Image (cartoon, grey):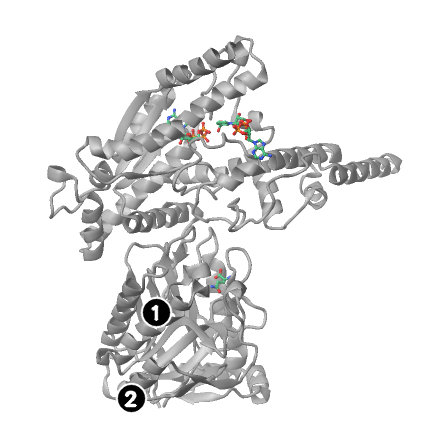
Amino acid sequence: MLRYATVATCVLNQWALDFEGNYARIRESIVRAKAAGAALRVGPELEIPGYGCYDHFLEDDTEQHSWEVLARLLEDRELHGILIDTGMPVVHRNTRYNCRVVVLDGRIVLIRPKLCLANDGNYRELRWFAPWTKRRQTEPHVLPQHIARLTGQQTVPLGDALISTHDTCVGIELCEELFTPESPHIAMSLDGAEIIANSSGSHHELRKLCRRVELIREATLKCGGAYLYANQRGCDGDRLYYDGSAMVLANGEVLAATEQFAVAEVEVVVATVDLGAVRSFRAAMSSRSMQAAAAPAYPRVQAAISLSSGRAQSDPSVRPTAPVQIRFHTPEEEINLGPACWLWDYLRRSGQGGYFLPLSGGIDSCSTAVIVHSMCRLVVEACARGDQRTIDDVRRCVGDAGAAAGADYVPQTAQDLAGHLFYTCYMGTENSSAETRARARDLAAAIGSHHVDLRMDAVVTAIVALFVAVAGLTPRFAVHGGGSAENLALQNIQARLRMLLAYLFAALLPWARGRHRSLLVLGSANVDESLRGYLTKYDCSSADLNPIGSISKADLRRYIAYARDHMDLPVLGAFLDAMPSAELVPFSAGCMQSDEVEMGMTYDELSAFGRLRKIARCGPLSMFAQLLHRWGDQMAPRQVAEKVKRFFYFYSINRHKMTTITPAYHAETYSPDDNRFDMRQFLYNTRWSWQFQRIDAMVEDIERQSSAAPAV
Ligand SMILES: Nc1ncnc2c1ncn2[C@@H]1O[C@H](COP(=O)(O)OP(=O)(O)OC[C@H]2O[C@@H]([n+]3cccc(C(=O)O)c3)[C@H](O)[C@@H]2O)[C@@H](O)[C@H]1O
Ligand SMILES: Nc1ncnc2c1ncn2[C@@H]1O[C@H](COP(=O)(O)OP(=O)(O)OP(=O)(O)O)[C@@H](O)[C@H]1O
Ligand SMILES: NC(=O)CC[C@H](N)C(=O)O
């Protein structure tokens, strides 16, 4: 008999603790799923309070308000007739669990707590939740009285069970559980679950989507069956961007998928799965059947619904969804889209009037500017598609722009929108060159930002004059015969004053144009410079937000080359050709050094150090051992040792700068973000005496061995 189950999954742009907005988005997704003929709708992990509530999960209010939202979903008759898989925290016998709550026709079918919590990198779920350790067991959960009154149930099953419908069996897997060696989908599929619903709160990292898709593809190839993946999308109040990509796979093929990056708040994908094909796929695998015959049974809870509703027999227009190709973005496209969407969510949710960027004519602030341009393009495209929510958000941001943008304003081009909400500023001094000034001006013209070009020498001179008056000594640059303390101080005061000016201008430039909302200040320190500490503390690296703070210089250069070629921005060629210079000292022939020379290491080396330090958790000795293998063909062990020691020296003398690092879009596993992602001390013994002696001893050992080895 033909059995075609129509099922839906979605991405929702939830916002931590925005119960009103989260409820509306959940409801909209269910209504849309139902209208498309789906009998099952799966939503993102913890979608009711929002995934990123962090320590708010410790507050009773968060659970209470979640039950209140659930009550509204339960009593809404328009949401009956579809199996709803939603997510919230549930306290059971005084212990808090991260749960799925499965609902049908105003009653709760099952509460399924998460079995394996995400607890590394960005995730701290063990801080708020306990894992459910009673495999294949349920317990009666006593419902809050207001819910019991609504559903007529005093208790509901809570635990590790499958959901049996009239025509199939559904199993639940929660985000991290997919990534674990012993994923529950294996045992659930062996026991007859034909559809696995995965609700995720999974963040974007460059080059990561591929892994997620491979895991799901592998799951449905090895076990057979359909897999519905739901995820949050957007910035829900933090550094993370959840990157959507809801999808439906069956027997190894992708049937439907949403975009990974987009500004839409609700996106639903619906697919019709041929359950008959799932059954024959499984039955054809003899080795699977042998394991299935021996598989332990799950408890099953009953849901009185048919996911295929018998429609296949009566309605010839219902047919299984044909496979599609999933779209994988290149890393350059990911840099272009992820941080841009994150910036848009942040801006519209912060209630501010736009962004202010100190634009230096160098490649880092140029990357930030191009990302804002990309944001404007995405927003304009959404407006052109008639996305009313985006149009309303735009009007709120630029709303007090007076005559320039009326109440019925709809931006026509990215440049038009940038003219209202993006301000760039070149802050020159006598050390600035005509080339950087021109590059900043030309880029601003190309992307349409409201550009200010100023000279700040009078401010620098006034501050230095104050010091001279107090100390009775005049500091000089090195090229004028000054010592290194003088030389550094004279550079750093210029850099730091730019930060002060940025905040002043961000507060007052819109006012000067007759507008009343102020601007958020953007920073542009990249991950490599932050790790090495190659920046002035509290200069323009201190800002409100930094879209490129966890992206490497090499990736940024590739991004700018991509944007030049694919975003119609030929002006970017000049940025790629330019030699990077901070332009903080007077120009003198031969004094211009590249950043790499100044830093004492190349950006590629810095990336290698960063990845080993952060991802492989290498201390000095194990980093030396690793790099010896990697670089041993090109340089002597002693040179490798010198480079490792130099990195650790600079890393540790500058680690204190990371305590003030600007909140940055999290794009890389080796983000330097302090307190949240990378929890390490900031006062070090920078001599690393014990560790470096061990490296030296190892070098001497290697040298002794190679000099003793007979010549070949
Ligand atoms: N252990 C510790 N814990 C807490 N704070 C500590 C500290 N050690 C120093 N400090 C504080 O930090 C200060 C030193 O830091 P800071 O003022 O930043 O100055 P500093 O790191 O000495 O100098 C800035 C560095 O950034 C480079 N830079 C600047 C601007 C642009 C570029 C570029 O081309 O991209 C490069 C510049 O070449 C120089 O190497 C000290 O005066 C002290 O106040
Ligand atoms: N002349 C300037 N005008 C405006 N902003 C500046 C200027 N110089 C520096 N900045 C700001 O300070 C930040 C750090 O300056 P720095 O000289 O270290 O630049 P950088 O890290 O080489 O970045 P970029 O490549 O964009 O110049 C820049 O990203 C920019 O936001
Ligand atoms: N919320 C989760 O369980 C997330 C875990 C998983 N490692 C991810 O990045 O997708």
Using the image, determine if residue 402 lies above or below residue 483.
Answer: below
Using the image, determine if residue 143 lies above or below residue 641.
Answer: below
Residue 568 image point, x, y percent: 29, 37
**Residue in the picture at 59% in, 69% down:** 181
* Residue 367 appears in the figure: yes
Residue 319 image point, x, y percent: 29, 79
Q: Quadrant of the C terminus?
A: top right
Q: Which residue is mark 2?
A: 310
> In the rendered image, which quarter is residue 458 located in?
top left
Q: As shown in the figure, which amino acid type bears the numbered disc 2?
A: Gly
Q: Secondary structure at mark 2?
A: loop
Residue 617 image point, x, y percent: 63, 50
Q: As shown in the figure, which amino acid type bears the numbered disc 1?
A: His
Q: Secondary structure at mark 1?
A: helix
Residues at marks 1 and 2, CA–CA distance in whole angstroms: 38 Å
Q: Is residue 64 left or right of residue 678?
A: left
Q: Is residue 517 left or right of residue 697?
A: left
Ligand 3 under 8 Å from disc 1 Cβ: no
How many numbered marks does the figure carry?
2
Q: Is residue 427 left or right of residue 586?
A: left
Identify which residue, 449 or 649, lies in the foreground.
649
Residue 521 image point, x, y percent: 35, 37
* Label 1 Cα neighbours within 10 Å, binned few <14 / some 14-19 / many ≥20: some
Using the image, determine if residue 636 lies above or below residue 670.
Answer: above
> In the rendered image, which quarter is residue 682 located in?
top right
The circle on residue 65 is 1
**Residue in the picture at 27% in, 75% down:** 72
Q: Nearer the viewer, mark 1 or mark 2?
A: 1
The circle on residue 544 is none
Q: Earlier in the sequence, mark 1 or mark 2?
A: 1
Q: Quadrant of the N terminus?
A: bottom left
* Residue 271 appears in the figure: no
